[in-house]
Image (spheres, rainbow, N blue to C red):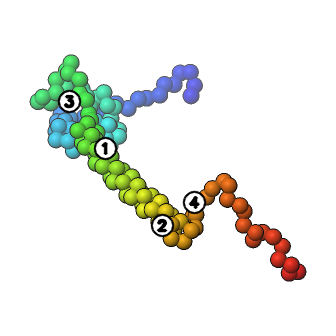
Amino acid sequence: MSKNQREVTVRRRFTEEFKLSAVRDYESGTHTVLEMSRLFAISETNIYNWIYKYSTYNKKRVRIVEMTESSSNKVSELQKRIKELEQIVGQKQIKLDYLEKMMELAKEHYGIDIKKNSDTPQSNTSEKTGKR
């Protein structure tokens, strides 16, 4: 671009009907401000200004906080997940107890110590068999 040329900025004007429609969509929960901003390629500031101007219950100097999930839903989901994990841990503990009991019974009835001990002698299977 040369020195004497300037880039022309395109300013879009929105009808009052469109602005009201956007505010209704926001208030009904159909779209968030971010979604509308991306959908219509409008700055979030413009959309917030429309909300402050046309909304029936959102006024200026009142901070609008959009929550993706309510904290109570999140807490209940986390509590549900904790219960699931506790159940899994309980099942694993039952399996562990069962296996330990089976090892005890094997030692009592068959004289086999299934648990690995550091003082257990190595097996002789690694010796040469004499075949060539």
What residue occupies the far left of the structure in this picture? Answer: 56
Image depth: mark 4 or mark 2 in front? 2
Query: Looking at the picture, which amino acid does disc 3 mark?
Result: Ile
Q: Nearer the viewer, residue 128 or 25?
A: 128
The quarter of the displayed image where residue 17 is located: top left
Residue carrying label 1: 78
Is the C-beta separation of discs 1 and 4 under 8 Å? no
Is the C-beta separation of discs 2 and 3 under 8 Å? no
Provide the secondary structure element on which disc 4 rests: loop
Residue carrying label 3: 51
Q: Residue at x 48, y 66 (%)?
A: 105
Image depth: mark 2 or mark 3 in front? 2
Is the C-beta separation of discs 3 and 4 under 8 Å? no
- In the image, residue 2 above or below residue 93: above
The disc, 3 or 1, on the residue closer to the chain's N-terminal end is 3
The image's mark for residue 68 is none
Q: Nearer the viewer, residue 24 or 2?
A: 24
Query: Looking at the picture, which amino acid does disc 2 mark?
Result: Leu
The image's mark for residue 115 is 4
Residue 81 in view (yes/no): no
Q: Residue at x 51, y 66 (%)?
A: 108
Q: Residue at x 42, y 58 (%)?
A: 97
The disc, 4 or 2, on the residue closer to the chain's N-terminal end is 2
Provide the secondary structure element on which disc 3 rests: helix
Residue carrying label 2: 105
Query: Looking at the picture, which amino acid does disc 1 mark?
Result: Leu
The disc, 1 or 4, on the residue closer to the chain's N-terminal end is 1
The disc, 3 or 4, on the residue closer to the chain's N-terminal end is 3
Image depth: mark 3 or mark 1 in front? 1
Answer few, some or many: residues within 10 Å of disc 4's Cα (few below 14, many 20 plus, some between 14 and 19): few
The disc, 1 or 2, on the residue closer to the chain's N-terminal end is 1
Q: Residue at x 32, y 37 (%)?
A: 34
